[in-house]
């Protein structure tokens, strides 16, 4: 007996499948033409079960029903191969923005323009019950459970993550308790506005586009997708645009200025969200903080502008 999911794809009548990519959550193949459809992909999930994926399926449907100006994933079928859960989804068009930039097809400005287009579209969505039913990161319960506003839900998530990962966070941030308390105070004064759909991981690899830079699809919802202030996506996308390059801070600052101005309430709120993201996601990939993402997050608190907005 083999657990190789590609044997299932062949058995389902799709022998001409080919690998598209492997990630932390699973393996993706293009199925090729067959009885299930001609433009499908199959995702074989490493750990997620059908129970885990049903809320994501409902969210995908809620998002698609709002007709954003780009394609989004849909879970058409959930199947099983031995202990592996497999979802069948439409094959979305386009090429990742980072690939287009690396190839020289798009300039950095065109990549930023495409990201701006996506941010503007998401700011006009409505976050319904399916969005609020999503979990965040590896948490077992919906982010919005027992909460009625985004600031409440976010603050509770920060509390849980800083408690769970107190040891590595405190080792890297000796003033963790001061930072945490300051962030909680600032978040408590944020207005409770109608939430929008926030992607939570809006980086260039997750935006597909044409060779001319028009966004065609947005991928990989669910890592930190929730009902929130759209400025959360704006703030984090500025940092994700170039996380580790030699000019990362320069690009980060330029995008924050483009999207929120050089000063004022929006800029300050964006910096609060960067601090929040740093605490909640620092240990997303390593419980001990032994990776580059952890270091990227804790370095948020070396920024004078972040500390100034926190008042520490």
Image (cartoon, rainbow, N blue to C red):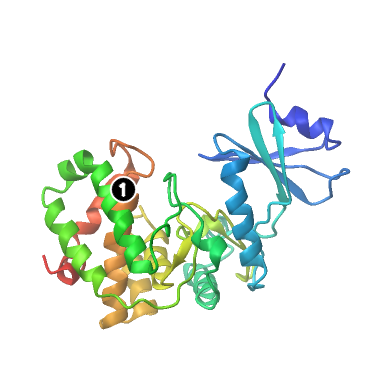
Residue 250 in sight here: no
Residue at the (54%, 64%) spot, across then down: 129
Q: Identify the residue under disc 1.
A: 282
Q: Quadrant of residue 158?
A: bottom left
Relative placement, left or right, of 107 versus 184 is right
Left or right position of 277 against 176: right
Q: Quadrant of the N terminus?
A: top right
Which residue: 72% across, 46% down? Answer: 41
Quick one: SS at disc 1? loop
Viewer-side residue, 265 vs 32: 265
Q: Residue furthest right?
A: 35
Q: Is residue 98 above or below residue 115?
A: above
Q: Is residue 287 visible?
A: yes
Name the image quarter holding the C terminus: bottom left
Which residue is most to the top? 1
Q: Position of residue 27 (x, y in %)?
A: 61, 38
Q: Is residue 110 above or below residue 205?
A: below
Q: Is residue 240 left or right of residue 87?
A: left
Residue 234 coordinates in the image, percent (x, y): 41, 70
Q: Is residue 103 above or below residue 111?
A: above
């Amino acid at each position: 007996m083999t657990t190789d999911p590609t044997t299932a794809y062949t058995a389902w009548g799709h022998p001409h499948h080919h690998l598209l990519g492997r990630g932390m959550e699973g393996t993706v193949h293009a199925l090729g033409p067959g009885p299930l459809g001609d433009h499908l992909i199959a995702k074989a999930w490493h750990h997620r079960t059908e129970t885990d994926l049903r809320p994501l399926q409902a969210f995908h449907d809620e998002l698609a029903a709002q007709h954003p100006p780009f394609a989004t994933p849909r879970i058409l079928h959930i199947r099983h191969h031995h202990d592996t859960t497999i979802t069948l989804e439409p094959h979305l068009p386009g090429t990742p923005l980072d690939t287009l930039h690396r190839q020289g097809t798009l300039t950095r400005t065109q990549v930023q323009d495409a990201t701006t287009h996506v941010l503007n579209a998401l700011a006009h969505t409505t976050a319904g019950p399916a969005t609020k039913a999503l979990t965040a990161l590896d948490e077992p319960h919906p982010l919005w459970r027992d909460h009625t506003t985004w600031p409440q839900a976010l603050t509770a998530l920060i509390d849980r993550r800083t408690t769970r990962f107190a040891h590595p966070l405190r080792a890297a941030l000796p003033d963790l308790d001061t930072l945490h308390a300051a962030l909680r105070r600032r978040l408590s004064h944020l207005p409770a506005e109608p939430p929008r759909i926030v992607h939570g991981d809006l980086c260039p690899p997750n935006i597909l586009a044409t060779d001319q830079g028009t966004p065609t699809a947005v991928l990989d919802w669910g890592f930190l997708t929730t009902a929130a202030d759209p400025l959360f996506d704006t703030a984090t996308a500025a940092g994700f645009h170039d996380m580790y390059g030699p000019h990362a801070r320069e690009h980060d600052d330029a995008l924050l200025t483009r999207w929120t101005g050089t000063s004022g309430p929006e800029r300050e709120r964006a910096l609060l969200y960067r601090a929040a993201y740093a605490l909640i996601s620092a240990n997303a990939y390593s419980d001990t903080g032994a990776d580059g993402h952890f270091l990227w997050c804790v370095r948020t608190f070396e920024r004078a502008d972040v500390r100034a907005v926190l008042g520490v």
